[in-house]
Image (cartoon, rainbow, N blue to C red):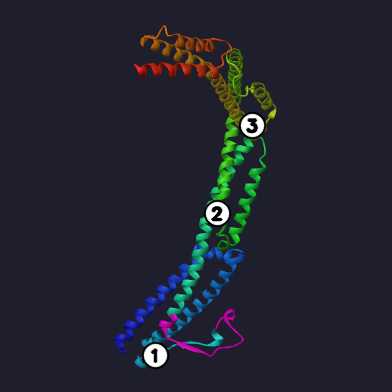
Amino acid sequence: MSLDGVDFELRRRAEERDRISDDLLDLDSHPGYQLLKGARLTGETRRRWDEAQHRAVTLWWLFDAYRGVLGRAQELRAGKPDLAALTGLLAGPSVELKPENVPVEKRSLLRAAGESITLDTVVARMDAAYRDVAETVAAADDAWSALLSRLDDADVARRSAQDLLRDLDGGDPELDRIGAEIDRIRAAVTVDPLGSVTLGGELDGLLAELTARRGLLEQAARIRAEYSDRARRLGDRIAQVAEAENEARSVRDTVLVKIVSPALPALPDQAAALRDRLSALDTAGDRWLELVERLTGLERAVDEALARARAATEAMAGLIGRRDELRGRLEAYRAKAVRLGHAEDAALGEMYSEARTLLWTAPCDLRQATVALSAYQRAIVRIGVAE
């Protein structure tokens, strides 16, 4: 090297040394690095951290060797320059790695021979060690950040649910179970973030359960506040069921009188049982979580009973409607026969009388009446076609 080349290389190496020193200090002060140093680790994280610590020791050891060579070169340059010696230090295999200089934790009983490497090789080895350590720190830090923040969210939701539960003056074994599972995951994440990454899915499930449980507690709180009004409205709704069932019975009695052998749906009779269930709700005391399920279940049952009663009424009333429809069609075909000039047709008159008798006789045989009306209809149609 020329003298200018030596000076340039010294400046470059000094800047490189300072940059590496800053990077090493940044790594050492990284929050994730400090957390790993201070934590009592287990599992996968402990294994990888042990490896990273060994790499960190090697990293600092190589850096000290690098600084030592650079320091000797700077001292040599400060006196009478020996360009050959300076070139050897800055560009040659000037970093001597002796077996006795290897850190204790990196030694082996099978001692290797010493090794001399260049400053560039030292930097390359430091870079590889630095990347390994930084990767482990970043992975652990990312795992902690991702999982612990979600655990914090879970704790906030759990505290909110527990506040609601205290207001309800009750207990909730399901909330206790969810809380215990969250505590278990937090304990695992704290000591082994890298080995706990797979717990993310389980944590998501617990968060969903916690959200649902909190929603149920909120609903219980609302029901406690609104219970009197909701119970009153539910009583009114049950009265509507009773009224609808009475109407269904009345229509059934009418159908049995007016229609022969009707195919009737089962007669609904739920109002009394629903009233009993409503009365039983009042005995639930302060078990508001239980009351939520019972009250909402009763509300569904009342709606279903009312729908069944109205459907039964509609189905039975449809039989009367069918009879009235047949009566209307019979008179319409009678009017058509008159228009066609067959008002005095004896055969048509006999068919009309048979159908009319069937339709205006109580109880009405809908099947026979339908057959008679169809025969009367076909006869009139044939007359119309013939003319």
Q: Is-magenta flag for residue 111?
A: yes
Q: Which is more toward the observer, 334 or 301?
A: 334
Which quarter of the figure has residue 222?
top right
Marks 1/2 in contact by CB < 8 Å: the verdict is no
Residue 64 to residue 173: above or below? below
Q: Position of residue 265 (x, y in %)?
A: 60, 24
Q: Is residue 122 left or right of residue 227?
A: left
> In which quadrant will I find the C terminus?
top left
**67 falls in the magenta region:** no
SS class, disc 1: helix
User: How far from the left and from the top, in percent, is residue 105?
Assistant: 59, 79
Q: Classify 248 as above or below 350.
A: below
User: Is 38 located above or below residue 164 in the figure?
Assistant: below
Distance from label 1 to label 2 (Cα)?
A: 58 Å
Residue 277 vs 335, above or below: the answer is below
Q: Tag 2 or tag 1, which sits nearer the N-term?
A: 1
Extreme top residue here?
A: 344
Pointer 3 residue? 294
Q: Residue at x 52, y 75 (%)?
A: 55
Could you tell me residue 57's position as x and y percent?
53, 76
Residue for badge 1: 88
Q: Amino acid at mark 2?
A: Gly
Seen at 46% across and 77% down, the residue is: 126
Q: Nearer the viewer, residue 319 or 84?
A: 319
| Label 1, label 3: how far apart the Cα atoms are | 89 Å
Over which residues does the magenta segment extend? 102-122
Q: Quadrant of residue 295?
A: top right
Q: Which mark is residue 201?
A: 2
Using the image, tell me which numbered label, if any, was put on residue 316. none
Give percent across and percent down for residue 337.
Answer: 40, 11
Determine crowd level at label 3: few under 14, some 14-19, many 20+ residues with C-alpha closer than 10 A.
some
- Is the Cβ of the residue at disc 2 closer than 8 Å to that at disc 3? no
